Amino acid sequence: MLFNELAIDLGTANTSVYARGKGVVVNEPSIVALNSATSTTEAVGTEASRMVGRTPSHIRTVRPLRGGAIADYAAAETMLVHFMKRASQGASWARPLVVIGVPSEVTQLERRAVKDSMYRAKARQVHLIEQPVAAAIGLGMPVSKPGGNMVVDIGGGTTDIAVISLNGLVHSKSLRVAGDAMNDAIIDYMRKSRDLLIGDQTAEQVKLGIGSASPLDESLSMEVKGRHQVHGLPRTVIVRDGEIREALAPIVRLIVRAILEELEQTPPEIAADIYANGLALTGGGSLLKGLDARLRAETQLPVNMAEDPMSSVVRGAGEILGDPALLKRLSIN
């Protein structure tokens, strides 16, 4: 049965599931709401995301992954079971073969944790694939040929930078700095500069609304609501794009520096291919306004934005799922 074969992008911020023969069937926040009074799960995914910061004391919302690694095994298993059942049309008896993407520099212990969680969630087989390779395949890059391709995948917990040729990594770097770190920077800025306490969801809205990596053609501003840290009362302030750009600058600089370091380590022949083809920018963090322009200016490379940056990894993993020979070649232990 086709729905017995799934590809999963288990992300810090979002989890996507691709069912063979159907495409992407799940794309929801990686959040679980747990009820300590009844020892039950209140909600998973989008429904749990709506509860963040709004729950009574006996209900807590948990993000099972931090920095691209599983931080709460029980919550991760609960979330995976829920998403896999949905992808399998609710058939609790289905034990799928699963291809799952992991960061390129994930440790052996972290790989084992992902596999163990998948087996506890009733997978019958688990294959790990490096996320940048899956992303490159999902973007349609000719990674099987002897030519250099560069992918920058900015997710929630990690930024994967990889140079790929002949279906393998020539060089790679995985930073534990990505979209979540940007949100934390905005929260910190609002607290220190505006005396305003805001949560992760508000920070995410600010990042997507007026956040940028380079100056915009037209200035933007937005209302931000939170709690005044001195008076303790609700408060609304107007924030401008320049302020948020300043708050995000250290994170952006780290990502740019890592890309430049990878280019410096790339063999000359492959570097020539990359300078001809450019780098591919994908992942939810790539949606930051002006990031592509900033990278063009800093690297002097063409920068190709993914049409659907949130699904590149899971679509690539889905393509690998449908090619047993490629799956065997790309699977990592």
Image (cartoon, rainbow, N blue to C red):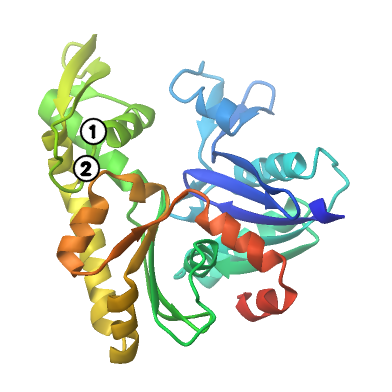
Q: Residue 69, position in %: x, y?
A: 50, 56
* Side of 12 relative to 112 (left or right): left
Residue of label 1: 210
* Residue 115 in view (yes/no): no
* Side of 293 relative to 132 (left or right): left
* Side of 305 relative to 145 (left or right): left
Q: Residue at x 61, y 59 (%)?
A: 114
Q: Which amino acid lies under the numbered mark 1 shown in the image of this protein?
A: Ile
Q: Which amino acid lies under the numbered mark 2 shown in the image of this protein?
A: Ser
The residue closer to the viewer here, 1 or 182, is 1
Q: Residue at x 29, y 25 (%)?
A: 198
The residue closer to the viewer here, 105 or 258, is 258
Figure quadrant of the N terminus = bottom right
Secondary structure found at label 2: loop
Q: Residue furthest front?
A: 276
Residue of label 2: 212
User: Image quadrant of residue 281?
Assistant: bottom left
Q: Residue 121, position in %: x, y?
A: 74, 50
Query: In the rendering, which numbered label is found on residue 270?
Result: none
Q: Residue 278, position in %: x, y?
A: 31, 70
User: Image quadrant of residue 40?
Assistant: top right
Q: Residue at x 58, y 68 (%)?
A: 129
| Location of residue 56 with respect to 219 vertically, above or below | above
* Residue 261 in view (yes/no): yes
Q: Residue 302, position in %: x, y?
A: 27, 66
Marks 2 and 1, how far apart at CA: 6 Å
Q: Residue at x 48, y 48 (%)?
A: 310
Figure quadrant of the C terminus = bottom right
Q: Are marks 2 and 1 in contact (CB under 8 Å)?
A: yes
| Location of residue 232 with respect to 289 vertically, above or below | above
